[in-house]
Image (cartoon, grey):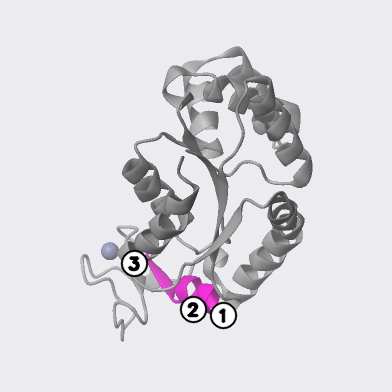
Amino acid sequence: MRLVLVGPPGAGKGTQAQYIASNLSIPKISTGDIFRANVSGGTDLGKLAKTYMDRGDLVPDEVTIAMVRDRLSEDDAQDGFLLDGFPRNVAQAEILRDMLKDWGQALDLVLELVVDDDEVVRRLAGRRTCSQCGRIWHVEFDDKKDDRCDACGGALFQRDDDKEETVRHRLEVYQEQTAPLVSYYADEGILVGVDATGPVEEVTQRAMDAIRPFMG
Ligand SMILES: [Zn+2]
């Protein structure tokens, strides 16, 4: 099973990626993990990527693509994989398609986690971080009535990233970048949307139900 997982910030994509990959016994391949592995392993690509990051620049597409190519060539990815964080745009999707084609492979499925914008705001903007121990609480889900950490008594604050305005902006950026990618895969006939609201286990179950018909 070769699949790509897409979803907005706050959709629980990282968690679902892990559960789905482990249910299918395939490696979860995220661009974040690939980056860290290359940089800490001191590979040529890692060193190259680091020169950009040290300058505060974005790592160019070619470097990311080369890292993904290397990772997908490894033994454990030959019978399938779950990609998280790649491709980010249609150009990268076309490169991935050609890369797989060269190897006689193709994507089976693109799973889109679907969450309402207001639900994402509710999840993220309700988060409060402890200024002492770093633990995260949720005003609604943890029924937090005061602004003190239950674990250490430290003062809670709202990270800038979690402010409603910032969350809404991140969602806009996501929609702008991802909408063309999602319609590209819809045209290819391999896109399936999964409702990502509700408990984590239920979302995983829904995802597995959506995947099953595509399994060879
Ligand atoms: Zn604390």
Taking the spot 47% from the left edge, 38% from the top edge, the residue there is 1
Locate residue 69, reporting x and y percent.
62, 23
Badge 3 is on which residue?
202
Instruction: Evaluate whether residue 111 shows in this view.
Output: yes
State the image quarter where residue 206 is shown: bottom left
The residue sitting at the top extreme is 44
> Residue 160, how many percent across, how many down?
56, 66
Say whether residue 138 is magenta: no
- The span shown in magenta is 119-130
The percent coordinates of residue 48 (x first, y second) are 67, 20
Tell me: residue 192, above or below residue 63: below
- Looking at the image, is mark 3 or mark 2 nearer the viewer? 3
Judged from the image, the secondary structure of the residue bearing numbered disc 1 is: helix
Report whether the residue tagged 3 is closer than 8 Å to ligand 1. no
* Number of the label disc, if any, that sits on residue 118: 1
- Amino acid identity at mark 3: Glu
Would you name the residue on which mark 2 appears? Answer: 122
Task: Give the Cα separation between the discs numbered 3 and 2.
Answer: 19 Å
Label whose residue precedes the other's in the sequence (1 or 3)? 1
The amino acid pointed to by label 1 is Asp
Q: Is residue 96 left or right of residue 40?
A: right
**What distance separates the C-alpha of mark 1 from that of mark 3?**
20 Å
